Amino acid sequence: MALLTDLINLDLSDTTEKIIAEYVWIGGSGMDIRSKARTLAKEVKDPKQLPKWNYDGSSTGQAPGEDSEVILYPQAIFRDPFRRGKNILVMCDAYTPAGEPIPTNKRHNAAKIFSHPDVVAEEPWYGIEQEYTLLKKEVKWPLGWPSGGYPGPQGPYYCGIGADKAFGRDIVDAHYKACLYAGINISGINGEVMPGQWEYQVGPAVGISSGDELWISRYILERITEIAGVVVSFDPKPIEGDWNGAGAHCNYSTKSMRGDGGFEIIKKAIEKLGLRHKEHIAAYGEGNERRLTGKHETADINTFKWGVANRGASVRVGRDTEKEGKGYFEDRRPASNMDPYVVTSMIAETTIIGKH
C-alpha cells in the first residue's frame, strides 16, 4: 500500500515542467459534478491561456448521441489539493460547438448579470452557508445513525463534540484545509443541528467568483468523501420527520448597504425580493418545499417575511446591521442543492437592476 501512496504523492516538479489540469464541470442533472484531466506543457495561471476542451454530452444527459460534442470553456483556476505541486483544478462552463451556452450552463447568464455596469458599481459580496449530510455508502443512511434506526432527538449535535455527537469530523476538517489550499475563501465550518449534517461557509466573495468557489468546494468535498467511502447528500430534507433540513443561506451586501445609511437600502432590497418571492423560490433548489415548512428554523415556502435576528423568516437581518445602520442581510430560502450561479445573480438582478 505504501508504494501506491508514494506514487500518488510524487512531486512532478523535480523531473518535468508539465502539469496536470483537472477540468471540472456540471452535468445534466444540475448537481452531478464531472471532471477529467489533461497534461499541459507548463504552469498556467490565467484561465484565458488554457485550451478549450470537449466531452461526450450524450453521457451526461446534455446532448443527443448523434451530435454529442459539448465544449468546455475554462473560467477559473484553483490549486489542486489532491495532486498538489503546480497542478490545478479548472472550473469550466459548457457550450455547443457553435458557441451557444447549453441549457444547463447557468454560469453564462450569471456572468452577464455580474458584468452589468450597475451591478459592477455596487460590488456585490456573498457569503454562502453550504449545509450537507454525510451518508453511509451501502445504506444511504446518515453517518453515526444506528442502521435503520434513529438517534436521540436534536439538541446535542449542533456544534457538538464527542463520539456520540459528531460524525465525520475527519472529512469535514480535510475539506476545510483542502479548500484553503485550493485558494477558496472558505471562512468556517460547524456541526449542524441534525447528526451527520455539517456546514461550511464560502465568502465573502465578489460576484461570479462566489459561484465558482462554491462549485469547486462541492467538487473537493465529493472527492474527499469518495476517498473516505462515504456519500455526500445535498438533499434539502434527507430525512423526513422532526429533523432540520439542509439549506444554503446566502448572505449578501452591496457597496450602498455597507455604507452609511445602508439599512434603508437593505429594507428596499428586501421589499424587492418579496415582490419576486415566487420566482426566487422556483429557482432556489429542487425539493425545497420539503424543507421550507415553517418549522425547523424556516419560513413557510408560500410566505415571504423578514425580521431582525429571526431564524423563522425568509430573510434575516442581523442585530449588528440594525444597530450600526448598515451591513448585510441573509436570504434563508435557498436549499442546499441550489445552483450558486443562479441564486447569487438573481439576488443581484432583483435588488440592483430591479427587474420586476
Image (cartoon, rainbow, N blue to C red):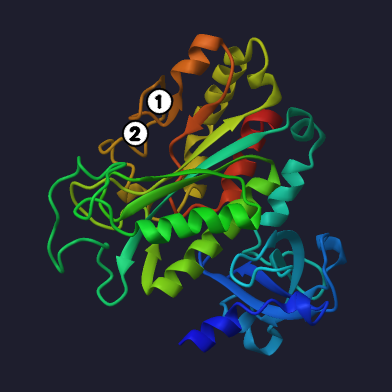
Estimate the spatial distance between the alpha carbons at disc 1 and disc 2, rounded to whole Å: 8 Å
Q: Nearer the viewer, residue 228 or 293?
A: 228
Q: Is residue 243 left or right of residue 30?
A: left
Decide if residue 242 is in sight here: yes
**255 lies above or below 114:** above
Quadrant where the C terminus sits is top right
Which residue position holds label 1? 305
Could you say whether the residue bearing mark 2 is in a helix, strand or loop? loop
- Three-letter amino acid code of the residue under disc 1: Lys
Mark 2 residue type: Ala
Mark 1 and 2 residues: CB-CB less than 8 Å, in contact?
A: yes
- Packing grade of label 2 (10 A; few <14, some 14-19, many >=20) is many
Where's the N terminus, which quadrant?
Answer: bottom left
Q: Position of residue 275 (x, y in %)?
A: 52, 29
Q: Which mark is residue 299?
A: 2
- Residue 103's x, y, as percent? 65, 64
Residue at the (55%, 53%) spot, across then down: 339
Q: Nearer the viewer, residue 116 or 128?
A: 128
